[in-house]
Amino acid sequence: MARDPEQRVTPQEIFPGARSVVVVALNYYTAHEHSDNPGKVSRYAWGDDYHEVVGDKLRQLLSWIKELWPDAEGKVCVDIQPAMDKAWAVRAGLGWLGKHSNVITEEYGSWVFIGELLLNFDLEYTDENVADQCGSCTLCLEACPTGAIVQPYVVDSRKCISYATIESRAPEIDEKIATKLEGWLYGCDICQDVCPWNQMTPATNESRFEPREDNVNASLSEVLELTPDAYAARFRHSAMKRAKLAGLKRNARALQ
């Protein structure tokens, strides 16, 4: 996060012609639940890779815009470019930043993916923002087993199960976190599962977010037996490839 901060705050560093940012949110909630068995996978990774799904939709939007304005040019951003996704989503009026640090929308809670389309022309803007509606609720802080939400709106990634099981490249999970994984193999949804705003989210109409086989709860033994070829085939077009084979096997060992 400390690398190239100018890229994060200056859209022109990503797309030199940028004059406007269109921010979108896509509901990914499906009506399935984890079992109590270890091997739980974060809801966002159950189906196809959201980078591809949201990216496809934004590219379709850009094509439509170009039909209306032939001189239009744009850049699609979906969680890969150094964009300030959550800050831009709040600025665009899609929702507010919850105490668990995820953007909460009134329609879908925080079960949303965020994407951006940078455009080379000016748009008309409104200044309407969605007020913070977390109120006095602290359920996400209280539920986090590792205490990673160190204060409202602040997450310490060094304590976060999602960071430890996805982003970290350490050969083994820190013992202080490994003893509190609560069955999570890839990512963690605890702070979102307890959020009152996430209790009435309607199911998405995007079929590509429906769970793949064994992606709600994965078999630890099967993960540990994966070969590189089997891993590549199983997680093709899946966000779970982010942890890499070594990371998934590390996580599975920690849960045994």
Image: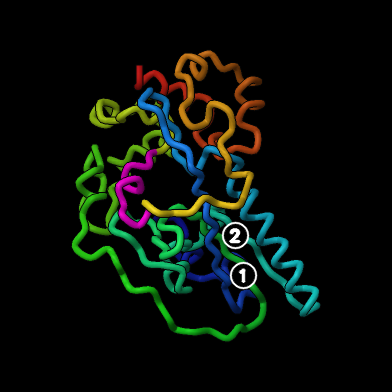
Where, quadrant-wise, is the C terminus in this rendering?
top left
Left or right of 3 on screen, residue 242: right
Colour convention of the picture? rainbow
Residue 39, position as x, y percentages in the image: 42, 25
Q: Which residue occupies 46% across, 27% down?
A: 217
- Of 109 and 221, nearer the camera is 109
Question: Which residue, given by chain and number where applicable, does mark 2 sit on?
Answer: 77
Pointers 1 and 2 in contact (CB under 8 A)? yes
Q: Which residue occupies 54% across, 68% down?
A: 23
Q: Main secondary structure of the magenta part?
A: helix
Vertical order, 79 against 106 (above or below): above
Range drawn in magenta? 188-198
Check disc 1 and report its element: helix, strand or loop. strand
Question: Which residue, given by chain and number where applicable, does mark 1 sit on?
Answer: 118
Disc 2 residue type? Cys
Q: Which residue occupies 58% across, 44% down?
A: 209
Disc 1 residue type? Leu
Where, quadrant-wise, is the N terminus in this rendering?
bottom left
